[in-house]
Amino acid sequence: MKEIHQLNKLFESRIRLGIMSLLMLEEWVDYKHMKTTLQLTDGNLASHVAALEKNGLLEVKKQFVGKRPHTSYKATVTGKAAFNSHLDALESLLKNRS
């Protein structure tokens, strides 16, 4: 079962898995949409985003829209590749479970 060793530890958290899943569907996802969709607190979202950003898996864009701050997130090329590899390992693990 070498596939188990190909799983990415960064995606073991359901929250990080959810964040990356959303980012694979859309190029940019705004803070409010991500927080609402994944039903997260501000602190929980911030800590998981920070871990993914630190590892180069997502990009954070902060700007002002009018006078309000607006934060959005995008999966990096590295992040997309890492997530796809993780999904491939999961798929392989499930296919070879006999």
Image: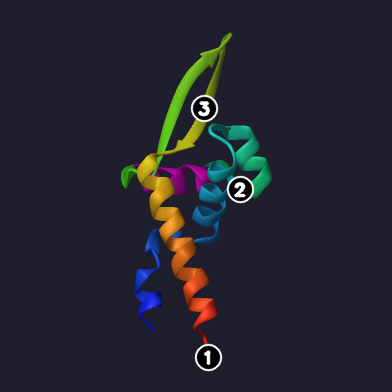
Residue 25: percent from left, percent from top: 59, 42
Callout 3 amino acid? Thr
User: Dividing the picture into quarters, in which one does residue 4 lie?
Assistant: bottom left
Describe the element under mark 3 as helix, strand or loop.
strand
Q: Quadrant of the N terminus?
A: bottom left
Asked if the residue under mark 1 is in contact with the one under mark 2, i.e. CB atoms within 8 Å, the reply is: no
Q: Earlier in the sequence, mark 1 or mark 3?
A: 3
Q: Residue at x 41, y 35 (%)?
A: 59
> Which residue bears the numbered disc 3?
71
Check residue 45 for magenta coloring: yes
Callout 1 amino acid? Ser
- Residue range highlighted in magenta: 43-53
Q: Nearer the viewer, mark 2 or mark 3?
A: 3
Q: In front here: 75 or 53?
A: 75
Callout 2 amino acid? Leu
> Which residue bears the numbered disc 2?
40
Q: Earlier in the sequence, mark 2 or mark 1?
A: 2
Binning the other alpha carbons within 10 Å of mark 1 as few (below 14), some (14 to 19) or many (20 upward) gives few
Describe the element under mark 2 as helix, strand or loop.
loop
Say above or below: 97 vs 80.
below
Q: Nearer the viewer, mark 1 or mark 3?
A: 1
Check residue 27 for magenta coloring: no
Main SS category, magenta section: helix
Say above or below: 14 vs 89.
above
Q: Earlier in the sequence, mark 2 or mark 3?
A: 2
* Residue 12 appears in the picture as rendered: no
